[in-house]
Image (tube, grey):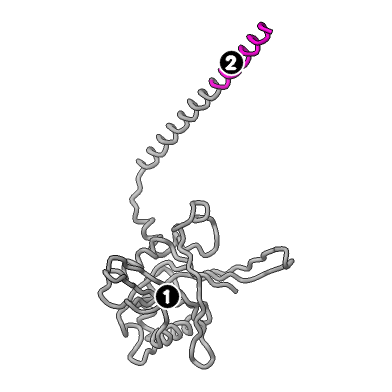
Amino acid sequence: MSVQVSISGPVFAQLLRQHAVSPNNQEGLLFGEISERRVNQINDQAAVNEHNEVTLKVCSFIKFEPFEIYDQNLKLLPDPLREMEAGLNGAKVIGYYCFRRNLPLTATYREHVISNALAKASCGQPFVLGLFSTTFNDNYSIHSMDHSFHIVTPQNDGGSRLGAASLRVVNLGEDARQEYRTQPGSAASLERGFFSDLAKSIPYNGREDRNVQLLNQLHNNLQKKLNALAREITETLQLHEETTQSYEQRHQ
């Protein structure tokens, strides 16, 4: 089974911005949904190669203060979690993220405990831990926003195991055909999350339609002119070729 984390470009950019302007370390919850599909790949080595693909679609996030959803012993507080989930149109907690400066992208004991508790509360669903860090060069002229994502698997002994998960940022770094192709787990959801809020907040009126119709009409007129010019050039070339052949025949 392969697991991938999917997030839209606007949500990922807003998440990085929250980290950049935060004066201190920051932590929060990732909300979204989980999709799973069975893929059958046929190649020369094996006639049937079926496997499951699980995608954790991050639609939004909420930051919280230390000890807001857990107590001094790092045990979860159920009431704050339910309040956060209540205002997100059915989105579920699918991950926990932590941002800290000048630290390697390795989970600390505290992050292990919190993510493990949240993963157990997700009732067996895949759960992701996102780690973010900022590094600088010697003269602070270059800032790097490093990140890594890990799948949290609770163990029977009470601990957890972290497995690396790939991150796919939708509509960033790919061509248009790949960015918006129909697929399960696309993070550019129009139903919930920051991408949905951004799309719904754009004012709309009939003026846009008129502008589009005008541009479409100009495009069609231009195409007609170009087609007429192409036919004229073709006829001119044919006439030139016939004239040349006639001239050569008379002088043979």
Q: Is residue 154 above or below residue 15?
A: below
Q: Which mark is residue 230?
A: none
Q: Secondary structure at mark 2?
A: helix
Q: Which residue is mark 2?
A: 240
Residues in magenta, as a range: 233-252
Q: Please give left or right for residue 153 compared with residue 136 in the image.
A: right
Q: Secondary structure at mark 1?
A: strand
Q: Quadrant of residue 72?
A: bottom left
Image coordinates of residue 215 in percent, x first then y, are 41, 36
The quadrant of the rendering that contains the N terminus is bottom right
Image coordinates of residue 116 in percent, x first then y, are 46, 85
Q: Quadrant of residue 59?
A: bottom left
Q: Is residue 57 above or below residue 112?
A: above
Other residues around mark 2 within 10 Å, as few (<14) / some (14–19) / many (≥20): few
Image coordinates of residue 230 in percent, x first then y, are 53, 25
Select label 1 or label 2 by which is in front.
Answer: 2
237 is within the stretch colored magenta: yes
Q: Is residue 151 above or below residue 173?
A: below
**Residue type, numbered disc 1:** Gly
Q: Quadrant of residue 37?
A: bottom right
Residue at 31% over, 83% down: 66
Q: Nearer the viewer, residue 127 or 175?
A: 175
227 is within the stretch colored magenta: no
Q: Nearer the viewer, residue 236 or 26?
A: 236
Q: Please give left or right for residue 251 compared with residue 211 in the image.
A: right
Q: Residue furthest right?
A: 47
Q: Which mark is residue 130?
A: 1
Q: Nearer the viewer, residue 230 or 215?
A: 230
**Residue type, numbered disc 2:** His
Residue at 41% over, 68% down: 89
Q: Is residue 212 above or below residue 103?
A: above
Q: Nearer the viewer, residue 226 or 83?
A: 226
